[in-house]
Image (tube, rainbow, N blue to C red):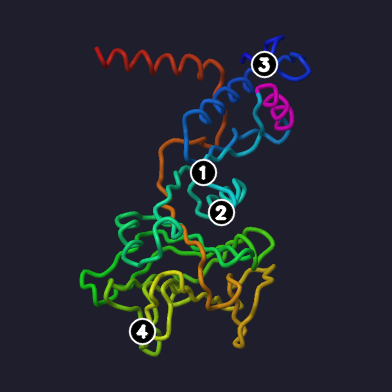
Amino acid sequence: LLTRFSNTPPRWGDRRVRQTPTKHFVNTVEFARRIAMLKGQLIRPPLMDEAERELFREDLTMYGLTYSPILDLPAGHEWVIKSAEEWVSLLDMIKKPMCRPSLLFKSSRDGSAYATMLQCVAGKSGLLFALRDGDTHRCGCFLGGEITPPADPKQTTRYRVPFFFYSLSGAYETVTKIELPEEKQNVEVAGTQGAVKDTKDEPRGNVAFASGCLWLGFDTPGPAADLSSCHLWIKRDQLPEGYTGVYTQHGDGSLAQTMNFTCDEMEIYHMEPTTYGWRPGKPRSFMDWLFGGMCRHTQNRDIDR
């Protein structure tokens, strides 16, 4: 508000003060409030009709805001997910409009030991894996459940769970979701003294996603010394249009540079649901916004008494 109406710094650049529709003013204040209060999650701008969206964009600039999602999450060169735009794409894929991603595991910080990873993700449901293969290929997967090892450390456990792959760069020009048939949405997890086996009953790795499409701790025989040794392949007919990556001799693709690769950075995020966020819908009127908040405050005060 100081920037909007002041004639001395700080002030809006060209000093012009234009009448702002009440609905725009209310939504601007609400958007700014959410940016200030809701840290560590995606904050979408208010839903506006296309006809008035451009005018609302202009009104937002008077308050130093832009009509774009705000994301207070790790992004940049040292992270697998490099930008807010990539985060927004991933959150849209997960279809959780209100969630707070929290970093559980980062291999450059925590090491690549399998036991360490299990400790970091224990009890967390809704896991986003982000993998980097060199400077060009970044990809990962989302697991709509937990990583649950068997009670016996020498055994494995296999279970169904919502699952999909995604590519950030390398295999596709843009961020792309790779969905799999329901029968392939599963994970098999080995105990710390065991190994997940392939279809020939040979021990291969620590964790196998999607019926063996992605392996962590992969080796022949396995498991490897740590999780960074990976194996990733996807059937050609399950790859969306726009694929520019490599093909194997069997015609399958990979989201990494090759099927067998060393992951030089692995990050695992817990996509924690929240009850706060901008809910799409018709904006409230000014009177509802103003006096609705006052009524709630009065009610809470009466309850305290």
Judged from this view, the residue extending furthest toward the top is 7
229 in magenta: no
User: Which residue corresponds to the image point at 69% horizontal and 17% vertical from the top-left?
Assistant: 20
Separation (CA) of disc 2 from disc 3? 34 Å
Q: Position of residue 3 (x, y in %)?
A: 66, 16
The residue pinned by badge 1 equals 73
The residue pinned by badge 4 equals 203
Q: Position of residue 251 (x, y in %)?
A: 62, 84
Task: Determine which of the numbered discs, if any, sits on residue 10 in the image.
Answer: 3
In this picture, which residue range is highlighted in magenta?
A: 53-63
Question: Disc 4 on helix, strand or loop?
Answer: strand
Question: Disc 2 on helix, strand or loop?
Answer: loop
Dot placed on the residue nearer the N-terminal end, 2 or 4: 2
Separation (CA) of disc 2 from disc 4? 32 Å
Question: Is residue 226 positioned above or below 58 on the image?
Answer: below
Separation (CA) of disc 1 from disc 2? 10 Å
| Tag 4: amino acid | Pro
